[in-house]
Amino acid sequence: MTSTVLVTGGAGYIGSHTCLRLLECGYRVIVLDNFSNSSPEALNRVQSLTGKTLEIITGDVNDGAALNTLFARHQIDAVVHFAGLKAVGESVAEPLMYYHNNVSGAVSLLQAMQSAGVRDLVFSSSATVYGDPASLPITEDFPTSTTNPYGRSKLMIEEMLRDLYRSDASWNLALLRYFNPVGAHPSGQIGEDPAGIPNNLLPYIAQVAVGRREHLSVFGGDYETHDGTGVRDYIHVMDLAEGHVKALQWLTRKQGLAAFNLGTGSGYSVLDMLHAFERACGKTLAYQIVDRRPGDVGSCYADPTLAARELDWKAERGVNAMCADAWRWQQQNPNGYN
């Protein structure tokens, strides 16, 4: 029997790539998205790439009545919850917007699931819940703490899910803590399309490569790393999408709640990524070292052993594929989906 999965925020960067993998794996997919920070064109392309159809519902996770109607009309087996705001700087400037959208939205979604008797959830969390880690690599049992409202909203939702599970063990919950998603589908048809100035490294580098930005500003050149620039665990978005499929499969085998790191287990510096992108696009890219950003940590990378053991998942694509796929997307879509 085909499982039906509700994907909230399914038109976003990670959501669209996950919808594509779910369709390829035979799931029936319903997307709920308010398109506040995403484009319906992403889902059109997912359908043309797979030759399969999605059901697309324009709506908001904060609209409890609309959620109840959705669950009443569809026999949903599981939910993958991506819908949320995700810019750290914006969260510092607009904390109430983040708590309303991310935390209140999760509450209304869980209430609707509870009323409908749907108990299987894969939650899109983040490595930001580890704050500034005391040691590396990071395992799932590390203490959690955050340095900004975006990260706190993710951690609050994790705590809420733990409380929910303690109150009712029929819930089945996978919390996926991503490290740094990059890259695009190898077709170049779907990828990361940030609104305004990119917050993340790779789309910014790509916009320098395509001529939309003059140079890359590298925040900090004096960290205790091999070249002085910050080190992160970059993971290809298609590996991340596969991780969500594996987490859904895990929910059908196991009862309970668990958090999983989705990362490669390797750290790359900002300049490592810049030079890898230079190889992908065949040109030298301008950059300037500027002051550190407040709240940034020097190094952060995962120990993905638990996901390998429990989910039968590991990242397969290296830094060269990440950059080549991101460059293909940028070349074919210099202005994103518009």
Image (cartoon, rainbow, N blue to C red):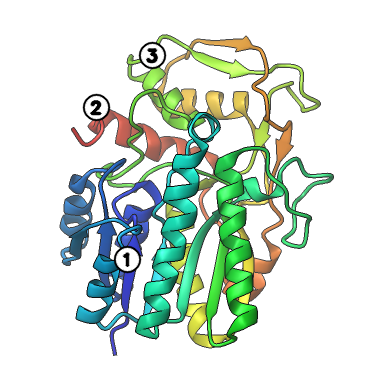
User: At 44% across and 25% down in the image, what residue appears?
Assistant: 204
What residue type is disc 2 on? Asn
The quarter of the image holding the N terminus is: bottom left
Of pointers 2 and 1, the one earlier in the residue sequence: 1
CA neighbours of label 1 inside 10 A, class few (<14), some (14 to 19), many (20+): some
Report, in whole angstroms, how far the alpha carbon at label 3 lies from the one at label 1: 41 Å
What residue did someone put label 3 on? 213
Pick the front one: 241 or 272:
241
CA neighbours of label 3 inside 10 A, class few (<14), some (14 to 19), many (20+): some
Pick the front one: 307 or 157:
157
What residue type is disc 1 on? Gly
What residue did someone put label 1 on? 64
Pick the front one: 72 or 129:
72
| Mark carried by residue 335 | 2
- 272 in relation to 243, above or below: above
User: At 51% across and 71% down in the image, what residue appears?
Assistant: 247
Asked if the residue at tag 3 contacts the one at tag 2, i.e. Cβ–Cβ closer than 8 Å, the answer is: no
What secondary structure is found at the residue carrying circle 1?
helix
What residue type is disc 3 on? Arg
What secondary structure is found at the residue carrying circle 2?
loop
Please identify the quarter of the rendering in which residue 60 is found. Answer: bottom left
Report, in whole angstroms, how far the alpha carbon at label 2 lies from the one at label 3: 12 Å
Q: Position of residue 54 (x, y in %)?
A: 19, 65
Asked if the residue at tag 1 contacts the one at tag 2, i.e. Cβ–Cβ closer than 8 Å, the answer is: no
Please identify the quarter of the rendering in which residue 146 is found. Answer: top right
